Image: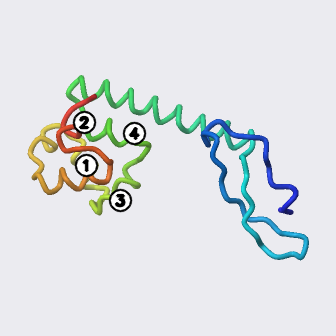
């Protein structure tokens, strides 16, 4: 993409911030150009955030029904999925899936809860309950 072609349409999801985009300058070198974003990017980001909100609300219903642990709600509320939580917490995916069961979750050691809480950016007390 040429430096002059970098989109500057604006994107609400960036909150007024700019982001770096790589483009070619007049000499053909790759340079970093600030961009205000573009409409297509905003639409896709908004759809993804809406899908995560829906997943969080569905998870909330499962937690209230006693089918799942609060961990599932917090994964989606913090805009993550099991794979991303596994990467950030250092806990294997199959273990995270197992910890989504309420009976298993209530028996987790504090060290495991701390790993999840740190990865999600919340306290252990928050992790154990719904907001």
Badge 1 element: helix
- Of pointers 2 and 1, the one earlier in the residue sequence: 2
Badge 4 element: helix
- Image coords of residue 65 (percent x, y): 23, 23
Residue 88, numbered label:
3
User: Against 26, is 103 above or below?
Assistant: above
User: In 3D space, how far apart are the residues under numbered discs 3 and 1 (Cα atoms)?
Assistant: 11 Å
Q: Residues within 10 Å of mark 1 (few under 14, many from 20)?
A: many
Q: Quadrant of residue 94?
A: bottom left
Q: Nearer the viewer, mark 4 or mark 1?
A: 1
Residue 76, numbered label:
4
- Of pointers 4 and 3, the one earlier in the residue sequence: 4
User: In 3D space, how far apart are the residues under numbered discs 2 and 1 (Cα atoms)?
Assistant: 12 Å
Instruction: Tell me, yes or no, whether the two marked residues, 2 and 1, touch with CB atoms within 8 Å.
Output: no
As drawn, is 62 to the left or to the right of 46? left
**What residue occupies the far right of the structure in this picture?**
26
- Which residue lies at the image location 32% right of the left edge and 48% below the top edge? 121
Residue 8, numbered label:
none
Instruction: Tell me, yes or no, whether the two marked residues, 4 and 2, touch with CB atoms within 8 Å.
Output: no
Q: Which residue is mark 1?
A: 117
Badge 3 element: helix
- Image coords of residue 42 (percent x, y): 67, 39
Q: Quadrant of residue 131?
A: top left
Q: Judge by depth and name the residue closer to the eye, 26 or 92.
A: 26
- Image coords of residue 80 (percent x, y): 42, 46
Q: Quadrant of residue 127?
A: top left
Badge 2 element: helix
Q: Which residue is mark 2?
A: 70
Which corner quadrant holds the N terminus?
bottom right
- Which residue lies at the image location 23% right of the left edge and 56% below the top edge? 115
Q: Nearer the viewer, mark 2 or mark 1?
A: 1
User: In 3D space, how far apart are the residues under numbered discs 2 and 3 (Cα atoms)?
Assistant: 18 Å
């Amino acid at each position: 993409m040429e430096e002059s072609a970098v989109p500057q349409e604006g994107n609400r999801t960036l909150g007024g911030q700019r982001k770096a985009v790589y483009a070619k300058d007049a000499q053909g070198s790759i340079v970093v150009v600030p961009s205000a974003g573009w409409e297509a990017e905003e639409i896709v980001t908004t759809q993804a955030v809406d899908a995560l909100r829906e997943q969080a609300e569905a998870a909330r219903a499962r937690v209230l029904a006693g089918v799942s642990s609060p961990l599932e709600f917090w994964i989606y509320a913090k805009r993550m999925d099991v794979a991303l939580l596994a990467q950030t917490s250092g806990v294997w995916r199959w273990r995270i899936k197992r910890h989504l069961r309420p009976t298993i979750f209530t028996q987790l050691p504090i060290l495991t809860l701390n790993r999840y809480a740190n990865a999600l950016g919340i306290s252990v007390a928050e992790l154990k309950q719904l907001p």
